[in-house]
Amino acid sequence: MPNTYTQIHIHAVFAVKFRAALIGDVWREQLHQYITGIVRAQGHKMLSINSMPDHMHVFFGMRPTQSLSDLLQDIKGGSSLWINAERFITRRFEWQGGFSAFSYCRAEVPKVINYIRNQQEHHRRQKFLDEYRQLLAAFEIEYDDRYIFSDPV
């Protein structure tokens, strides 16, 4: 698109279905690389990616050539197909429906990258649901508690 200039930084968060702790340490980095490949193949720029056993954080520079929903569908659909094909787990892997996405200005990029890189340390002090609600509140996003990820059973 000639004469189109953008600077769009998106932090997306999505969870494993039922918040099951299925993302294994043994293949976690491979998953990050696979998702990074999807993001790059769609023309976007991965800035930071990290996961916990039950959820994923991706932070990327987005090009206006694709909708955010389509990109997240590609990421979630493609990665779950790959996880199942590789048979990293004994049962079927699925991501929870939906996602959250937050936009940041350029000045905040280093802070968000650091936040995502330090997820393991961060979650020693704060539960995922508390973090998630805090993000929604900070961005003044209204939500219905019925559709917020529930604690694992």
Image (spheres, rainbow, N blue to C red):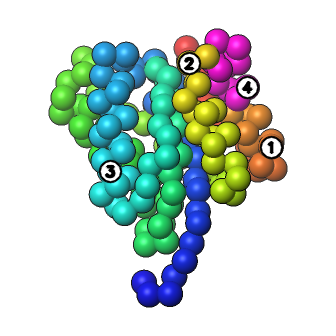
Name the kind of residue labelled 3 in the image: Ile
Quadrant of res 26: top left
Number of the front mark, 1 or 4: 1
**Crowd band around label 3 with a 10 angstrom C-alpha radius: few (<14), some (14–19), many (20+):** many
Principal secondary structure, stretch drawn in magenta: helix
Q: Nearer the viewer, residue 15 or 103?
A: 103
At horizontal 37% and vertical 35% (from top left) the residue drawn is 32
Q: Nearer the viewer, residue 91 or 117?
A: 117
Is 142 drawn above or below residue 70 in the view shown?
above
- Distance (Cα) linking label 4 and label 2: 15 Å
Q: Which residue is mark 1?
A: 138
Quadrant of res 104: bottom right
Residue 135 on image: x %, y %: 73, 39
Is 137 drawn above or below residue 91 in the view shown?
below
Is 148 drawn above or below residue 87 in the view shown?
below
Q: Which residue is mark 3?
A: 38
Q: Which residues are magenta?
A: 122-131
Name the kind of residue labelled 1 in the image: Ala
Q: Quadrant of the N terminus?
A: bottom left
- Distance (Cα) linking label 3 and label 1: 29 Å
Q: Which residue is mark 4?
A: 130
Q: Which residue is mark 2?
A: 120
Residue 31 on image: x %, y %: 33, 32
Q: Earlier in the sequence, mark 3 or mark 1?
A: 3
**Crowd band around label 1 with a 10 angstrom C-alpha radius: few (<14), some (14–19), many (20+):** few
Local secondary structure at mark 3: helix
Quadrant of res 131: top right
- Distance (Cα) linking label 3 and label 2: 24 Å
- Distance (Cα) linking label 1 and label 4: 12 Å
Local secondary structure at mark 2: helix
Q: Earlier in the sequence, mark 3 or mark 4?
A: 3
- Distance (Cα) linking label 1 and label 2: 21 Å
